Amino acid sequence: MGRAKTIARRTFLIGSAAISGGVAFGIYKVKTPHENPLASGLGKGEATFNPFVKITPEKITLITPHADIGQGVVHMQAALIAEELDVEFGQFDTDFGVPDPAYWNTALAAEAVPFAAFDEGFGARSMRNVMGGVAKLLGIMGTGGSSSVPDQYEKLRTAGAVARETLKLAASQQSGVPVGDLKTANGAVQLPDGTTLAYTDLAEAAGGLNPVSDVTLRDASTWRLIGKPMAREDIPAKTTGTQTYGIDLKIDGMVYASTRVNPRRAVMNSYDANGADTMPGVSSIVPVTNGVAVVANSTWRAMNAANQIEFDWASAPYPAEQDGHWAEVAASFTEERLDKEWRTEGDVDAGLDGAELIEAEYRAGYVAHQPLEPLNAIVRADENGAEVWTGHQLPRFLQQKVAAVVGCEPDDVVYHNQYSGGSFGHRLEFDNITLAAEIAVQMRGTPVKLTLSREEDFVTDYARQIGMSRSKGAVKDGKVDSWNLDIATVSAARSQSGRMGVPVPGPDTQIAAGAWAMPYAIPNLRVRAYAVPELAPTSSWRSVGASTAGFFAESFLDELIHAAGADQVEERLRLCSNDIHRKVLEAAAEMSNWGSEMGPNQGRGVALVESFGVPVAEVVEVINTGAGIKIDRVYVAADVGRVIDPVNFENLVQGGVVWALGHAINSEITYSDGMAEQTNYHASEGMRMYQTPEIIVKGLENADKIRGIGEPPVPAAPPALANAIFAATGQRIREMPFNKHIDFV
């Protein structure tokens, strides 16, 4: 039992020196490892070596704490551990684990610093270290910002190696064979005589050892999994409809609920149940923040009853009509609303003075997240705390939110993360969970399953930011010479962080993301970001600021290059100041056979946008059919430093392109009478299958740092499409969604 106490006190040995920042916080404090949450409650014969690996006599469990919202991150995390642990898919279980500071996100803070991703200067590195130190000390655990791979790439491999070497040490002590003569494969230690000792059989012996922390990660030339095509183990279940998502869960004694809250984001003045309380299966109607919840014996009955209720909603705290939103954005290009001048090179005013100006205004409206699985949550509250079942990207913040409703400490909220049927940033919000908690505290001891109707999910969504750009540019001697790019959007970061109670210090790095750090050495260039006062509340949407700013920048650059009479790829390559970006653009051009002749009524467009440190170049080919634009092919090249799984990489890129193109051509949220007008997919279609192009993908590995690919394919697709439409038709599309101005087939 003495050894068990020692194990319980063991702390996280992985990556303890990965974050410096000791000057700001004290070297000891920052480097002090978090305790291993798996160490408490170990049974007889069970072993854990770090927060990511647990082995019992029955099975091997790998902890994959990043939320899986369809991007395959459970698969990715498991592969990184398995590569070094020498286990194969099918030999282990995975588990999301518990919310704990030990799972802090090493990479999440990097996007918040006001430096370009490829800036390795002293100031940039120091700021990243400081922010990383803050993230570790606070134990910030989250999935987002395409940070899962950069966060876990070395951390999980090291976790697997620590477990492997400790198991080898246990086998050495048990067999008498020196550790150096032992090998591992297929979840077992191999002795020179061919004898194998299964990891599960070594669990008890290994559990009594101090983990071997001095490990060497294997060279890439020896990898079995990383970089090789892999079959994700969740795909068979998802393709056969047998995958369990949060919406599928049932808990004994559970009741069902549906809510109606003010779609104008204000209070509820009053309501008239209008017979809803006596409808079949309805047990009660209870108050929740800004609305009511119907509790019934099925979700369908709860939703039907909620639709029967008549409400008197208070007015919206933002303009009631969409024109008022656009007017506020247009009025924001002022000195008072300047958030930051992100880039100044040369003398822009002198470069534009007296030149023949090219000017344009671009717009991007609100869009919804609209994942296939509507928001849901199960919450059971009692006098001691609460238990929650749902998919979410910020588990520890979730605990805080629920604790505030229930009236307990965050550690008294037990959270079970689930697979999510999509998110795109939707599951960074908490309303569905806090509403479920509000219902649960009114019927303590009873599990409450809240499911939002599709309509409620749409009208209460925190949409992508609305924004606008104004550009003035000039060309000289057949080259792009001067450009002033002003971008004004509401700050999704401040809107979202305000609801979390976390202030955003300094400028919002996302307003002009995808534009201010563009890799072009234009002689005279200025990029300014303007913060529009909050209108309808907004939130992170797949690729966040780059989804709008990338469209603004690469579309207008196309206009400048056209005015110069230059080739769109050649001029971009001439301007490109970073070799990594240049190779990405060259790859996309080569893939698409850029410069080759196209048939009549056809056109190609190109765009290069960096987001989350990943440069992505896309070439879109379209055909003007007479009845509308057909998107024929898309070629994509991206550099993430290291492709973990080529199959999943390709799927994520293709999915990102479909997502981006669908929203660019078809989707928008508009407001009337203070409420979102689009309430279901019929009014915000995304991309139809018949509209989906062939998408050809190439992953490059020239960059030094490892990056994620979940979001970066999105920003380059809309401008590449807009530029292709111009090439085919001569018509400039300067506003998303494009179907306001041109038809698609």
Image: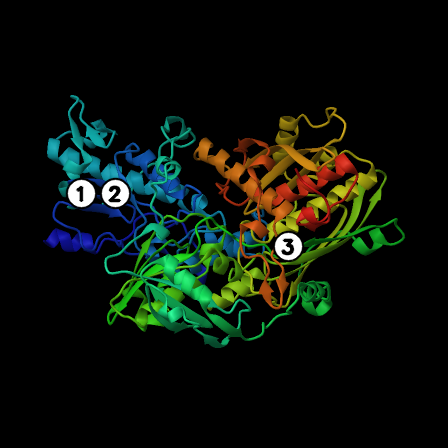
Mark 1 packing: few (<14 Cα in 10 Å), some, or many (20+)?
Answer: many
Answer whether residue 550 is visible to the viewer in this image.
yes
Say which element carries label 1. loop
Question: Compared to 425, does 522 lie above or below?
Answer: above
Left or right of 190 in this view: 723: right
Q: Position of residue 77 (x, y in %)?
A: 37, 42
Mark 2 or mark 3: which comes first in sequence?
2
Q: Where, by quadrant of the figure, is residue 566 drawn?
A: top right
Q: Position of residue 689 (x, y in %)?
A: 55, 37
Say which element carries label 2. strand
Mark 3 packing: few (<14 Cα in 10 Å), some, or many (20+)?
Answer: many
Task: Please tell me which residue is depicted at 21% across the width and 35% down the height of the picture.
Answer: 168
Q: CA distance from mark 2 to mark 3?
A: 42 Å
Mark 1 or mark 3: which comes first in sequence?
1
Q: Amino acid at mark 2?
A: Thr
* Label at residue 56: 1
Q: Amino acid at mark 1?
A: Thr
Q: Which residue is mark 2?
A: 61
